[in-house]
Amino acid sequence: MCRNIRQLHNFEPPATDSEVYAAALQYVRKVSGATKPSQANQEAFDAAVREVADATQHLLNHLVTTAPPKDREVEAAKARARSAERYGRAG
């Protein structure tokens, strides 16, 4: 998995459309090897991003869990703390 793609399931508030789209875009960029596709590939690239975003949203809508939802701010603070420890600097 691409390191820039973040977990979207089981957060309060739920993942937004823009977060789902951003994850789909990162996935398609990684798989295609192109950050910015050529004009010849733009239509296929954009269609793939839409399809991956739709599939991702479908998955998120249908996943079930008994775990309580995670708080975005708490999880972000944990990530900053891990980063600071890993790289030896304050977040």
Image (spheres, rainbow, N blue to C red):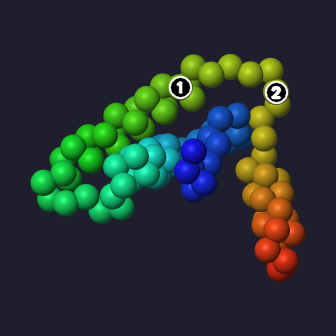
- Height in image: 85 above or below 60? below
- The residue to which callout 2 is attached is 67
What residue lies at 57% left-to-right and 20% top-to-bottom?
62
Which of these two is toward me, 73 or 9?
Answer: 9
Residue 47: percent from left, percent from top: 26, 40
- The residue to which callout 1 is attached is 59
Residue 27: percent from left, percent from top: 45, 46
Badge 1 crowding class, 10 Å Cα cut-off, few under 14, some 14 to 19, many 20 or more, is: few
In the image, what residue type sits under mark 1?
Answer: Leu
Which of these two is toward me, 71 or 53?
Answer: 53
- Residue farthest left in this picture: 40
- Height in image: 50 above or below 41? above
Residue 21 visible in rendering = no
Distance, label 1 to label 2, CA atoms, is: 17 Å
In the image, what residue type sits under mark 2?
Answer: Ala
Please give left or right for residue 7 compared with residue 34 in the image: right
Residue 71 visible in rendering = yes
Nearest to N terminus: mark 1 or mark 2: 1
Which of these two is toward me, 11 or 31?
Answer: 31
Q: The residue tagged with tag 1: helix, strand or loop?
A: helix
> In the rendered view of the protein, which quadrant contains the N terminus?
top right
Residue 88: percent from left, percent from top: 85, 77
Residue 82: percent from left, percent from top: 83, 62
What residue lies at 82% left-to-right and 31% top-to-bottom?
68
